[in-house]
Image (cartoon, rainbow, N blue to C red):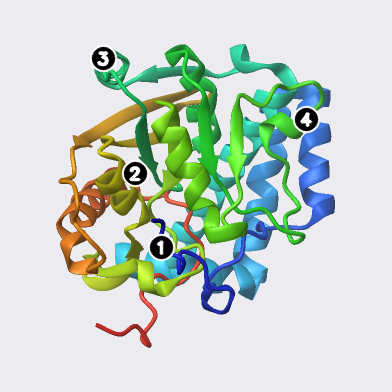
Amino acid sequence: MPDKNIIDKNNIKWTSKSIGSKFGHNFFYFMVKLGGRRLAYFFLYFIVLYYSLFFPSIREKTDPYLSKRFPDSGIIKRICNRYLLILYLGKALIDRALLGISGPESIRVSFTNPNDLSRIKSLDSGFILLMSHTGCWQVVMSALSKLKKPVNLLMLRNDQDIDKHYFEHGNAKNIFKIINPEQFLGGTIEMLNVLKNDEILCIMGDRIFKNKELSVLINFLGKDAKFPFSAQKIASITQKPVVILYSHKSGPDSYQLNISNIIHIPAKLGKKKESYKPYVQEFVSSLELFVQEYPYQFFNFYDMWEPDQEK
């Protein structure tokens, strides 16, 4: 049976509310419609500089990660790092708006390793696609259409959200089904069913939706941080493989996808969180390699290393 503790509304540690204002997001959507990517990017450089210098809330959101990734940075370097991180985030948001407004042909998507697409096509069942808030994950969603399998995404949306997903622009088609983690049992039954039907289940492996009990401590960038093991637990129950995938912006109009690993988790690991820790470690190790190579394309704006975490 699914774990009834999959959701605990008192344990949420982050919000899906986006950086910036509703007016700011709408301004960039208009720029995309008016002049495409180039015009939107032109304004982005100046607006990001303003936000980086004069908004303390930006510093609060970015410093937990940047201080771990660049521990020896001075004041000037910290400001530059903050600017670049928000700049890449802004480009990702513009790109996903472009994807919805102008269509999938507006962004080129390829695999770093040409054999990666064949690897996941060769899986003869459904699988869990374990992703992170890197690059532009919505580009990944559009690329999954090539697999000819139904796609499902565990995603939290709430009233604080002001940014639009690509399928919320114009006549863009949503190619995936959203599973709400706030529904009964956190959507666990629905997730088990889609895997039983050999569909694709996409889960973000770098955020705890609600329940701290479904997390383990893993060293990430030199300090223990909490990572969820829900995906690994579901994989153990269903005996479906876990595909770890990242995306990164590789050019003005292009993204690359990379499959870090395909993990087969043993059956019947039970409820003890320590049983899942080695498999979460594989994900975290790959994420650490990613942020070493692409330090400004990790968009997880909350403190993963909170001091009140318990062993």
Say which residue label 2 marks: 294
Query: For the residue marked with disc 3, what is the amino acid?
Result: Ser
Query: For the residue marked with disc 4, what is the amino acid?
Result: His
Which mark is nearer the camera, 2 or 4? 4
Which percent across, then down, holds residue 187?
54, 51
State how far apart marks 3 and 4 are (Cα). 33 Å
Say which residue label 4 marks: 169
State how far apart marks 2 and 4 are (Cα). 28 Å
Which percent across, then down, holds residue 301?
51, 62
* Residue name at image x 26 percent, y 65 percent: 271
Locate the C terminus and report the quarter of the image it occupies: bottom left
Give the numbered dot on residue 3.
1
Element marked by disc 3: loop
Say which residue label 3 marks: 122
Disc 2, disc 4: CB below 8 Å? no
Which mark is nearer the camera, 3 or 4? 3
The quarter holding residue 165 reads top right
* Residue name at image x 27 percent, y 12 percent: 118
Which percent across, then down, holds residue 62?
49, 65
- The answer to whether residue 143 is left or right of residue 274 is right
Disc 3, disc 2: CB below 8 Å? no
Where 52 falls versus 198 (above or below)?
A: below
Q: Which is nearer the N-term, disc 3 or disc 4?
A: 3
State how far apart marks 3 and 2 are (Cα). 29 Å
Element marked by disc 2: loop
